[in-house]
């Protein structure tokens, strides 16, 4: 039998895990929206924080912090002059070994050789060039000098082609010939591409012959086409150029001389020059010649230093992309491969989850773009309204919670003589005759299924609880002969007249003072919560939200979540009451409810020509016209309840006068309890009509 081993799935995200619920992301984003943040800013903040809840994903700020830590660690790895230091040490060792061999020899040849060694230039590259044709007397010195040349060749080639150091460790002359052939073939392929003659088949033939020089076949960094190969080589070439730029002028000249000497000795100078020109022309954006500071103490070879500088450049580019602080920034700008190389696979998965948020919010109908601006859809507004309402109810005392309404008129209404199918939550009287008749007709169609008759109890039909209008026992025990089994679909209830609906007007101050006092976000949350409560729990009521500053206007539900305050002068309650009055007049048979949320007394009114007139302190005309609208509300039997968000003396005096004329109540809640007060007051009036 086959044997299986089980363990955690390690190749990316769990394919069996449930999909991410985008509603959680909307709720997290809605926290900022309900505080007054624009939807696009709220989405950007969410992407920076990451996804909430269990199984969430890290945000851009967390990834950015990791990138910066990685950059600091790389800078502390070592110095850039390690190859120079090692080359000087090997050169000094070889010369010392040669002198030790020459010293015991009294002949003139030994003295001439010593003189030649004495006149070697201080520059390491020039000294190596002078010694390239020197006939070493000491076998140990010759071996040391050969080791020096092998070191330089492998380091210099590794600086250009990562991994070449390991490929050349065997010191096989055929390896160098193969490197020459590879570079010639690469340059020919680049020339064909420049003429528009290159094909993917050309690249695949090249990789079939030389692909082992660019990583194993299962290496994720192995290039898959010419563009990826060019990008990889160009980044290392630019890093080598930055390495030279980061050294002192003396070190730069010395290392450049060593690299030129190696290329000439290997017969690669011409091909390397052609390749460097092609790479610079194709990728001029890689910061060629830009110095980079390394702060570590350990000396780094040219290959390792180039790798560190290339990674630093990638991290700098990744840091800019993750920062998203440039015009037109998008998550699509972040290179997934750069994230994987720097931070690992988990970071790529986190980035992918963040990228999907905006797409999923749009695809599932929560966000839409209109004229380049991100907006909330009605579906999203309903969701945010539910969130605001949940917050309000969570702060109400247990005695104020519970079922705040039912879907139909209830037992308080008069019977209409008709019946309808029972729905969960109905409180209407059960139509026993039609219910049992439905069960009998169904049992005739389905013989052989007798059972005791039951009635709905605790809101669930057929639960086995006996009720008025029946004489049967519960469902427990053996069925009696001739009994009828009741199904949920059998139950019907008597229709009753619907209650009188309510015409609700919520007047919300949009003036600039609301922002200055920090009450605007609370007013916004309250508006969403009340609108959601009325439309979902009391659909027979007609609600109108009216915002007012220098002018008043009716607010559509989709406007409310993204609504911003008005940076204007004026609190035109006069105009708002006129609009509210028209709403009440359109529903003459509804009970009128007027709720006003404001932090200041009226300071503006409408003139006969329709223009707004602002005056502070309030003019007599403003107060007279506003109180005239209050008196009209009183004649409509509309009680006006005020919710003051400030304790200004003029405001208190005004609302007390309104209460005296209208009989309404005055509340002075803290901003964070405004929603609780408004919703509770509406429910109090609503319960009073039951």
Image (tube, rainbow, N blue to C red):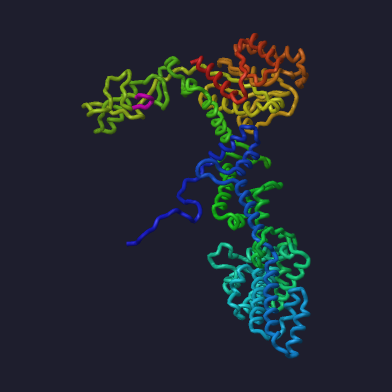
Q: x, y (%) of residue 451?
A: 26, 29
Left or right? Give the position of 412 relative to 268: left
Q: Position of residue 104 (x, y in %)?
A: 69, 86
Q: Which of the two residues, 657 or 662, is positioned nearer the viewer here?
A: 657
Tell whether 185 sits left or right of 458: right
Q: How far from the left and from the top, in percent, is residue 458? A: 37, 24
How many marks the image carries: the answer is: 0
Residue visible at 42% across and 25% down in the picture = 425
Q: Above or below — where is 163 with respect to 318?
A: below
For residue 458: magenta? Answer: yes
Q: Residue furthest bottom?
A: 107
The answer to whether 557 is drawn above or below residue 238 in the figure is above
Which residue is painted at 59% across and 48% down in the image? 355
* Closer to us: 668 or 113: 113
The residue depicted at 57 percent of the width and 33 percent of the height is 384
Q: Is residue 635 visible?
A: yes
Residue 164 included in the magenta stretch of the image: no
| Residue 313 appears in the figure | no
Residue interval drawn in magenta: 456-462
For the N terminus, the quadrant is bottom left
């Amino acid at each position: 039998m086959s044997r299986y081993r089980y363990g955690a799935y390690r190749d990316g995200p769990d394919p069996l895990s449930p999909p991410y619920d985008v509603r959680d992301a909307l709720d997290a984003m809605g926290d900022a929206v309900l505080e007054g943040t624009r939807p696009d800013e709220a989405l950007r903040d969410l992407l920076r924080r990451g996804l909430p809840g269990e199984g969430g994903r890290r945000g851009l700020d967390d990834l950015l912090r990791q990138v910066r830590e990685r950059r600091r660690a790389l800078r502390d790895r070592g110095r850039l002059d390690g190859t120079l230091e090692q080359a000087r040490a090997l050169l000094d060792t070889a010369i010392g070994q040669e002198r030790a061999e020459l010293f015991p020899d009294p002949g003139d040849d030994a003295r001439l050789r010593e003189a030649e060694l004495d006149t070697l230039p201080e520059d390491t590259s020039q000294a190596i060039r002078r010694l390239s044709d020197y006939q070493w007397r000491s076998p140990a010195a010759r071996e040391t000098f050969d080791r020096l040349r092998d070191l330089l060749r492998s380091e210099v080639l590794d600086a250009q082609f990562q991994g070449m150091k390991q490929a050349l460790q065997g010191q096989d002359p055929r390896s160098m010939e193969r490197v020459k052939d590879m570079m010639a073939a690469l340059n020919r392929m680049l020339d064909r591409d420049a003429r528009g003659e290159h094909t993917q088949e050309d690249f695949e033939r090249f990789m079939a012959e030389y692909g082992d020089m660019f990583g194993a076949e299962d290496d994720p960094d192995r290039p898959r086409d010419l563009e990826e190969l060019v990008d990889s080589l160009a980044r290392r070439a630019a890093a080598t150029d930055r390495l030279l730029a980061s050294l002192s002028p003396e070190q730069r000249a010395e290392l450049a001389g060593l690299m030129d000497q190696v290329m000439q000795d290997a017969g690669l100078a011409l091909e390397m020059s052609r390749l460097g020109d092609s790479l610079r022309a194709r990728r001029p954006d890689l910061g060629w010649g830009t110095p980079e500071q390394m702060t570590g103490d350990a000396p780094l070879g040219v290959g390792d230093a180039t790798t560190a500088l290339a990674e630093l450049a990638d991290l700098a580019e990744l840091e800019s992309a993750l920062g998203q602080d440039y015009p037109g920034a998008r998550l699509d700008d972040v290179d997934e491969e750069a994230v994987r190389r720097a931070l690992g696979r988990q970071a790529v998965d986190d980035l992918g989850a963040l990228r999907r948020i905006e797409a999923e919010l749009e695809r599932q109908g929560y966000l839409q773009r209109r004229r380049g601006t991100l907006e909330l859809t009605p579906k999203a507004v309903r969701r945010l309204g539910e969130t605001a309402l949940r917050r309000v109810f969570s702060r109400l005392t247990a005695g104020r919670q519970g079922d705040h309404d039912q879907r139909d008129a209830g037992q308080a209404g008069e019977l209409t003589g008709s019946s309808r199918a029972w729905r969960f939550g109905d409180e209407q009287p059960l139509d026993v005759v039609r219910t049992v008749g439905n069960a009998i007709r169904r049992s005739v169609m389905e013989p052989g299924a007798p059972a005791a008759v039951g009635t709905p109890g605790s809101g669930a039909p057929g639960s086995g609880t006996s009720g008025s209008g029946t004489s049967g026992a519960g469902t427990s025990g053996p069925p009696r002969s001739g009994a009828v089994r009741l199904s949920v679909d059998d139950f019907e209830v008597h229709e009753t007249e619907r209650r009188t609906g309510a015409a609700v007007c919520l007047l919300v101050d949009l003036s600039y003072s609301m922002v200055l006092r920090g009450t605007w976000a609370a007013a916004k949350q309250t508006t969403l919560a009340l609108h959601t409560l009325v439309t979902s729990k009391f659909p027979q009521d007609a609600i109108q939200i009216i915002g007012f500053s220098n002018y008043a206007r009716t607010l559509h539900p989709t406007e409310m979540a993204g609504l911003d305050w008005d940076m204007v002068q004026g609190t035109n309650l006069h105009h708002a009451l006129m609009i509210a009055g028209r709403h009440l007049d359109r529903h003459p048979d509804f009970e009128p409810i007027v709720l006003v949320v404001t932090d200041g007394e009226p300071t503006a009114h409408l003139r006969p020509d329709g223009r707004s007139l602002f005056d502070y302190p309030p003019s007599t005309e403003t107060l007279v016209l506003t109180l005239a609208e209050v008196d009209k509300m009183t004649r409509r039997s509309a009680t006006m309840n005020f919710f003051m968000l400030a304790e200004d003396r003029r405001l208190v005096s005004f609302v007390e006068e309104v209460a005296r004329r209208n009989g309404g109540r005055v509340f002075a809640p803290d901003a964070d309890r405004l929603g609780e007060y408004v919703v509770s007051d509406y429910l109090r009036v609503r319960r009073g009509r039951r």
